[in-house]
Image (cartoon, rainbow, N blue to C red):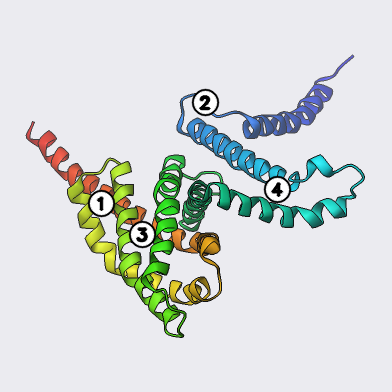
Amino acid sequence: MVTVEDRALEEQNEEPNGGIGQELEGETRMPRFGSEDYEKFVGRAINATIVLGFGTYAITNFLTIDHDYWQGWTLYEVLRYAPVHNWVAYEEALKSNPVLAKMVISGVVYSIGDWIAQCYEGKPLFEFDRTRTFRSGLVGFLLHGSLSHYYYQFCEALFPSDDWWIVPAKVAFDQTAWAALWNSIYFVVLGFLRLESPDNTFKELKATFWPMLTAGWKLWPFAHLITYGVVPVEQRLLWVDCVELIWVTILSTYSNEKSETRISESSTEAKPGSSSNSLKE
């Protein structure tokens, strides 16, 4: 026969377990469909899939460059020859289709650079703005790779001598005429892709033109001593794109900070107006 005291004891033993089960259930519960948390969860999942997918694809292609000759190879031999043979494949791509090869490299670098910029701004690793990253990568692919290819050829024709002063002259030309032109192109095209009005885009460009140019002087003159003094013409864009990972972070941060500031200011100005209208009504 179960007494009242025995039943009370059983209830006390069950309550803690029930509480733990409820807490665990709450922790693992999926966000409600259509809620803000659900949208964030889906966004993180998509971003993680994109990053891991492209990362896996790149690493797989890098490591399997010699898969046709792997018979009898050790893992050490696969890892040893992969960098060399990838470099050979890159040089062959430069010979067969140099503009397209450089466009692809710049597109990848500008996408990664914007992703780094968003992480630097405080966003979690997989909560980046996909549209913003796509815009930056599109500008790198369509414009930076192709324009840089022809710019470096033009620069060689403009300064054909091998005298000692040629390298400093190329660096000076690069950091004035070319840097001003490319920064402006990047900023204006991003504004166009964000569907901003030309007036707002040029106002923001005017406000950021000099800070962007002078920010580049802290980085590029030192990098370009190697660009124009050591690296061959056909390989220059690859070296420059490696440094661009730092520079695109700066460029993207400047561009998007101004856009976000303008949007927040316009929304702040709109709120008092709407509240005053409601009071009148």
Q: Which mark is residue 254?
A: 3
**Amino acid carrying mark 1 in the image:** Arg
**What's the distance in space between the residues labelled 3 and 2, CA to CA?**
36 Å
Earlier residue among tags 4 and 3: 4
SS type, badge 3: helix
Give the residue pinned by disc 1.
Answer: 262
Q: Nearer the viewer, residue 44 or 23?
A: 44
Closer to the observer: label 2 or label 1?
1
SS type, badge 1: helix
Residue at the bottom extreme of this rendering:
164
Give the residue pinned by disc 4.
Answer: 62
**What's the distance in space between the residues labelled 1 and 3, CA to CA?**
13 Å
**Amino acid carrying mark 4 in the image:** Phe
Residue 142 at x, y = what percent?
A: 41, 46
Closer to the observer: label 2 or label 4?
4
**What's the distance in space between the residues labelled 1 and 4, CA to CA?**
43 Å
Which residue is at 43% across, 78% downward?
A: 161
Dots 3, 2 in contact, CB < 8 A: no
Residue at the right extreme of this rendering:
72
State whether residue 178 is above or below residue 63: below
Q: Residues within 10 Å of mark 1 (few under 14, many from 20)?
A: some
Give the residue pinned by disc 2.
Answer: 32
Q: Nearer the viewer, residue 223 or 96?
A: 96
Which residue is at 39% across, 74% downward?
A: 159
